[in-house]
Image (cartoon, rainbow, N blue to C red):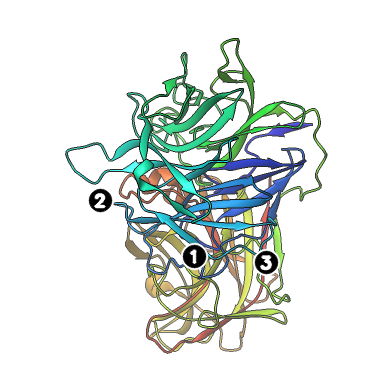
């Protein structure tokens, strides 16, 4: 078997990978999307199945009002003492001098839960991970944030002893063990003990095209005791601009039962518009930061090296002891809303789906109109990741608005400042109409305006479709579900990419979603009913 990268396509960033017996698990960041932390499982590192998210209650995670790309940054999954340990960070401020955050710990004897109530650990910095030493001691390893404008905000990697009796850190033991190289922005630490030495894996260069992972080594956990791997970095694509995979870096190491080694890393697959240089801009990553896996070997001096060079490979040899895992061939989804639980692929913004948003079951989804799609507090939307460059998504909607402040439809969404949708609304000229609009860097544009499409009086339901074709995407509508009309508006998919959002905002860590939404900012809570949803990948 071959591992084909990315193994987790579409917004699956900052992987924390472990092995428990013969099963591998990867935990990924989810930022402002709920539920928090995505976990996949595999026995072969090739095929992966999505498991229920651990942070599925407001007891474990409450992100109401969090900024875009706040929330869950770089969770750390580990296994020790016959249970899973999950450290996660809830970031409340993303831009400016401060990164107000809280690091939490929850545990479970089963990867499927239940997970314990969260223990507040500290707020020193993000990207926290728990290291279980072979002498029984435990340490929190984390990026350290410095708000002072006269210092660099990335103030090295801090290690602090964790007391398992009190389940608290001892802040007096905190010490900086590594400050990175001149590349700067050292973060994402994971610590391992291998053949009697401590190996620290850490990301540098920012999570963009300059991203990289370095490895440092020490015989102790003393302050500033780690030396950086020579002839590094360990992995990067900064100097491989023409390679299919880009931005590899932040990740985690795992050892197989047969003593092979693999490294899971975040990765992106940017594309370029026609007539653009493939080097500058290097591209637009509409699928966000995904997960790749590279094979690792150890050189004669005991340093880890990525097989094939530090740029990595698209196809990688699977472990010799891999147990073939059954998993879906792609991520297509058909949902008729017959279950008493939302499909595992659905996500909501910041808070769980509640009766305030609507209800589902018995063949329909009701969404109660709330705030606009620019609202960080009260939004009635469910959405799923773009996980392919080319796909179609379709739904059927029944909605009877009576003012222009009421809207419901099908959306392609990155964050509250970058999204578009096709929707049913109302205007003074034609009553119920179909409109297409886009929010681009917070600037809202209605594309049809006075030419909004009148919905015939005898039509109860309207069908909407979006066709995403890598660089661009369009919207269509139908009054019978058979005959479709394409709206003459072609939208630039790059607007929904990390790289585009980065140009004007610090919150650029997620990826494009497609979903269903209802808005009624008049406050009258008009309800939209959706009959089904189809997401069909074309590659």
Q: Spatial distance from mark 2 to mark 3, Cα to Cα?
A: 37 Å
Above or below: residue 200 compared with residue 388: above
For marks 1 and 3, give the CA distance: 20 Å
Q: Which mark is residue 96?
A: 2
Mark 1 vs 3: CB contact within 8 A: no
Q: Where is residue 369 shown, x and y percent of the image?
A: 47, 81
Give the number of the disc on residue 61.
Answer: 1
- Percent across and percent down for residue 359 are 60, 81
In what quadrant of the picture does the N terminus appear? Answer: top right
Alpha carbon of mark 2 to alpha carbon of mark 1: how far? Answer: 24 Å
Image marks 2 and 1: residues in contact by CB distance under 8 Å:
no
Of badges 2 and 1, nearer the viewer stands 1
The crowding category of the residue bearing disc 3, from other C-alpha atoms within 10 Å (few below 14, some 14 to 19, many at least 20), is some
Which one is nearer the viewer's eye here, 289 or 255? 255
- Mark closest to the chain's N terminus, 2 or 1: 1
Residue 431 position within the rendered picture, expressed as x and y whole percent measured from the top left: 45, 86
Q: Earlier in the sequence, mark 2 or mark 3?
A: 2
Whole-percent x, y for residue 110 in the image? 70, 57
**Disc 3 target residue:** 343
Q: Quadrant of residue 464?
A: bottom right
- Pointers 2 and 3 in contact (CB under 8 A)? no
**Residue that lies at the very extreme toward the top in this rendered image:** 300
Q: Secondary structure at mark 2?
A: loop
Q: Say which quadrant the C terminus sits in.
A: top right
The mark nearer the N terminus, 1 or 3, is: 1
Q: What's the mark number on residue 74?
A: none
**For the residue carrying disc 2, how many other residues have a C-alpha within 10 Å: few (<14), some (14-19), or many (20+)?**
few
Seen in the picture, residue 399 relative to 158 is either above or below; the reply is below
Which of the two discs, 1 and 3, sits closer to the camera? 1
| Mark 1 element type | loop
């Amino acid at each position: 078997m071959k591992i084909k990268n990315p193994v987790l396509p579409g917004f699956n960033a900052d992987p924390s990978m472990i092995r428990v017996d013969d099963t591998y698990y990867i935990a990924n960041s989810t930022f402002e999307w709920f539920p928090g932390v995505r976990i996949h499982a595999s026995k072969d590192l090739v095929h992966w199945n999505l498991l229920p998210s651990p942070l599925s209650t407001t007891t474990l995670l409450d992100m109401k009002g969090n900024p875009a790309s706040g929330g869950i940054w770089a969770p750390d999954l580990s296994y020790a003492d016959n249970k899973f340990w999950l450290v996660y960070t809830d970031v409340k401020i993303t831009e400016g001098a401060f990164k107000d955050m809280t690091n939490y710990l929850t545990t479970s004897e089963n990867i499927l839960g239940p997970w314990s109530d969260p223990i507040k650990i500290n707020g020193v910095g993000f990207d926290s991970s728990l290291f279980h030493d072979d002498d029984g001691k435990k340490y929190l390893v984390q990026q350290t944030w410095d708000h002072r404008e006269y210092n660099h905000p990335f103030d090295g990697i801090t290690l602090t002893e964790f007391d398992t009796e009190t389940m608290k850190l001892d802040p007096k033991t905190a010490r900086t063990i590594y400050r990175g190289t001149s590349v700067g922005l050292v973060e994402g630490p994971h610590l391992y003990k291998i053949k009697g030495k401590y190996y620290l894996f850490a990301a540098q260069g920012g999570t963009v095209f300059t991203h990289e992972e370095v490895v440092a080594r020490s015989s102790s956990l003393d302050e500033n005791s780690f030396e950086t791997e020579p002839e590094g970095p360990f992995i990067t694509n900064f100097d491989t601009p023409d390679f299919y995979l880009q931005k590899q870096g932040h990740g985690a190491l795992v050892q197989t039962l047969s003593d092979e080694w693999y490294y899971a890393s975040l990765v992106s697959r940017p594309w370029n518009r026609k007539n653009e240089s493939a080097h500058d801009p290097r591209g637009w990553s509409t699928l966000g930061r995904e997960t790749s896996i590279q094979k690792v070997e150890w050189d004669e001096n005991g340093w880890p090296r990525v097989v094939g060079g530090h740029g990595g490979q698209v196809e990688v040899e699977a472990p010799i002891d891999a147990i073939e895992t059954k998993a879906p061939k792609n991520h297509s989804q058909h949902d008729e809303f017959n279950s008493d639980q939302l499909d595992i692929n659905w996500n909501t913004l910041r808070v769980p789906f509640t009766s305030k948003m609507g209800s589902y079951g018995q063949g329909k989804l009701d969404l109660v109109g709330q705030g606009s799609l620019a609202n960080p507090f009260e939004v009635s939307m469910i959405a799923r990741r773009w996980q392919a460059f080319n796909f179609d998504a379709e739904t059927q909607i029944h909605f009877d608005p009576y003012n222009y402040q009421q809207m419901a439809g099908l959306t392609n969404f990155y964050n509250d400042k970058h999204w578009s949708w096709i929707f049913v609304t109302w205007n003074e000229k034609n009553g119920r109409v179909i409109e297409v609009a886009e929010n681009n860097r917070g600037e809202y544009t209605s594309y049809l305006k006075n030419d909004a499409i009148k919905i015939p009086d005898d039509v109860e339901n309207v069908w909407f479709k979006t066709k995403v074709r890598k660089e661009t995407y369009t919207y269509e509508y139908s009054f019978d579900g058979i005959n479709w009309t394409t709206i003459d508006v072609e939208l630039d998919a790059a607007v929904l990419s990390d790289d585009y959002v980065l140009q004007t905002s610090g919150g650029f860590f997620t990826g494009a979603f497609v979903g269903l939404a209802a808005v009624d900012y008049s406050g009258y809570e008009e309800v939209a009913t959706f009959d089904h949803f189809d997401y069909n990948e074309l590659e």
